Amino acid sequence: KGKGKGKGKEERAVAVGFWEAWRIPGVAPFAFCLFFSKLVAYTFLYWLPFYTSHTAIDGEYLSDYEAGTLSTLFDVGGVAGGILAGHISDRLGARAITAAGFMYCSVPALFLYRIYGDDSLPSNAAFMLAAGVFVNGPYSLITTAVSADLGTGSGSRPALATVTAIIDGTGSVGAALGPLLTGYVSARSWDGVFTMLMAAAFVAGLLLTRLVVAEVAAKIEASRSRVASPEVYEVVI
């Protein structure tokens, strides 16, 4: 019994620390990617109803109730985006490629929503839905599957809780900063707000560049191995 207790204490003592968790490959890039991703997502979450009610759609202004109801489409798109991002990343086996791809796609989605969202109610709803898909897709992927992969891939040392806290905590800083900055920027121009959001989404994608390159290289190498394996088999025969 004494040996068992000692062994348990020893196992608990070797858990990955805070700075060690930061040094796990992939943690820092995904953490900062989530910072900018949540900055965009939470800015929409808090400011979209206000923006919608103060923007003439097809020449008419919506009531607060109508604007709030319409804004829920961003969250509906987010649900679909999270499912789609998870499915694609599982099929490809490439978390970084999926997350970066969604973030890059969110830039034109935000641009189109700003430019054409006031043309008509259907166009506003369609572009809002698309923005929700691409903005919230990687956000959902990083806080769940990516955190689990990185936290359980550090060997035999427990790291899941620490890695998840680092990634989600860093993202939460962006979630607080985005709506705060929007309050100041929107006083001058909503074009400035959307420029800020598009820049944040683009930077989020850029932060994963090294991981994307590594995943692409791994896919190419795996493809070459599959092509070469029949030849090796024939030589052995």
Image (cartoon, rainbow, N blue to C red):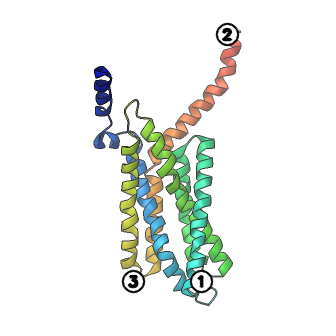
Q: Judge from the rendering whether residue 53 lies leftward or rightward of residue 230; answer left or right.
A: left
Please name which of the two marks, 1 or 2, marks the residue nearer to the observer: 1
Judge by depth and name the residue closer to the eye, 39 or 228: 39
- Residue 38 vertical placement versus 43 (above, below): above
Label of residue 187 in the image: 3
User: Which residue, given by chain and number where applicable, does mark 2 sit on?
Assistant: 236
In the picture as drawn, the residue positioned furthest to the bottom comes out as: 60
Q: Earlier in the sequence, mark 3 or mark 2?
A: 3
User: Which residue, given by chain and number where applicable, does mark 1 sit on?
Assistant: 66
Judge by depth and name the residue closer to the eye, 79 or 97: 79
Disc 1 residue type (three-letter): Glu
Residue at 43% over, 54% down: 33
- Is mark 1 in CB contact (under 8 Å) with mark 2? no
Residue 176: x and y, percent? 37, 66
Label of residue 149 in the image: none
Residue 154: x and y, percent? 40, 34
Judge by depth and name the residue closer to the eye, 142 or 59: 142
Could you classify mark 1 by the number of other residues whose Cα lies within 10 Å: few (under 14), some (14-19), or many (20 or more)?
few
Q: Quadrant of residue 196?
A: bottom left
Q: Earlier in the sequence, mark 3 or mark 1?
A: 1
| The C terminus, quarter of image | top right
Could you classify mark 2 by the number of other residues whose Cα lies within 10 Å: few (under 14), some (14-19), or many (20 or more)?
few
Measured Cα–Cα span from mark 3 to mark 1: 23 Å
Q: Earlier in the sequence, mark 1 or mark 2?
A: 1
Disc 3 residue type (three-letter): Ala
Please name which of the two marks, 3 or 1, marks the residue nearer to the observer: 1
Disc 2 residue type (three-letter): Val
Measured Cα–Cα span from mark 3 to mark 2: 73 Å
SS class, disc 3: loop
Residue at 59% over, 78% down: 69
Could you classify mark 3 by the number of other residues whose Cα lies within 10 Å: few (under 14), some (14-19), or many (20 or more)?
few
